[in-house]
Amino acid sequence: MQRYLRLLLLFNILVIIIGSPLTHKKLATTHIKLQAAVAASNRCTSSKQCAIEETGADPCGGPRGYTIYSTVDPKSVRKIKRLASETRSIHATLNKEDRKKNPYPACVKLIKPEADCKDKKCIAVAPK
């Protein structure tokens, strides 16, 4: 029984050591794909064609960031929403792992920007 518990503990430690870098790499890859999808479809004629999506997940709740994107192409919107959702899911996993090491994480409250159309591109602007 004791040997089984040692093996189980060793396995869990290996999962944390090996799994975490893979999760960080997946997060970075997902962010790159998200930025590419936003850039590829970023066109607008009015601010009504621009939207905001939360990205990532702060350990204390709320997003880690925001992505401003164009809603002109429905296919691109679906892709952007899926990738943003992936960033939230991956961050939630990382937050869970981090809570084991640090039960009192640093929390950041972000101010949600507004989306606007300028020079036929969707951009983030400070809230009014």
Image: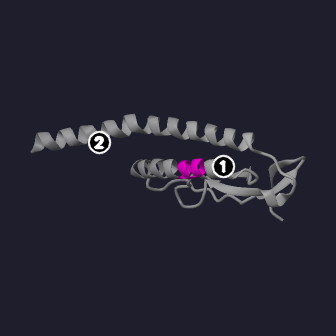
Circle 1 — which element? Answer: helix
Residue 31 position, x and y percent, is 61, 41
Give whichever of 69, 19 is nearer the camera: 69
The residue labelled by disc 1 is: 75
CA–CA distance between discs 2 and 1?
A: 40 Å
Quadrant (top left/top right/bottom left/bottom right) for the N terminus: top left
Instruction: Determine the image quadrant of residue 54.
Output: bottom right
> What's the magenta bit mostly, secondary-structure-wise?
helix
Residue 89 position, x and y percent, is 50, 51
| Closer mark to the observer between disc 2 and disc 1 | 1
Furthest-left residue in this view: 1
Amino acid, disc 2? Asn
Left or right: 47, with 37 as reference point = right
Q: Residue at x 68, y 42 (%)?
A: 37
Q: What is the image's colouring?
A: one colour
Left or right: 47, with 3 as reference point = right
The residue labelled by disc 2 is: 12
Q: Which residues are magenta?
A: 82-88
Quick check: is 22 in the magenta stretch?
Answer: no
Amino acid, disc 1? Lys
Residue 40 position, x and y percent, is 73, 39
Residue 17 position, x and y percent, is 38, 36
Q: Residue at x 71, y 60 (%)?
A: 111
Quadrant (top left/top right/bottom left/bottom right) for the C terminus: bottom right
Q: Which mark is residue 33?
A: none
Quick check: is 84 in the magenta stretch?
Answer: yes
Q: Residue at x 80, y 62 (%)?
A: 127
Left or right: 58, with 121 as reference point = left
Which of pointers 2 and 1 lies earlier in the amino acid sequence?
Answer: 2
Circle 2 — which element? Answer: helix
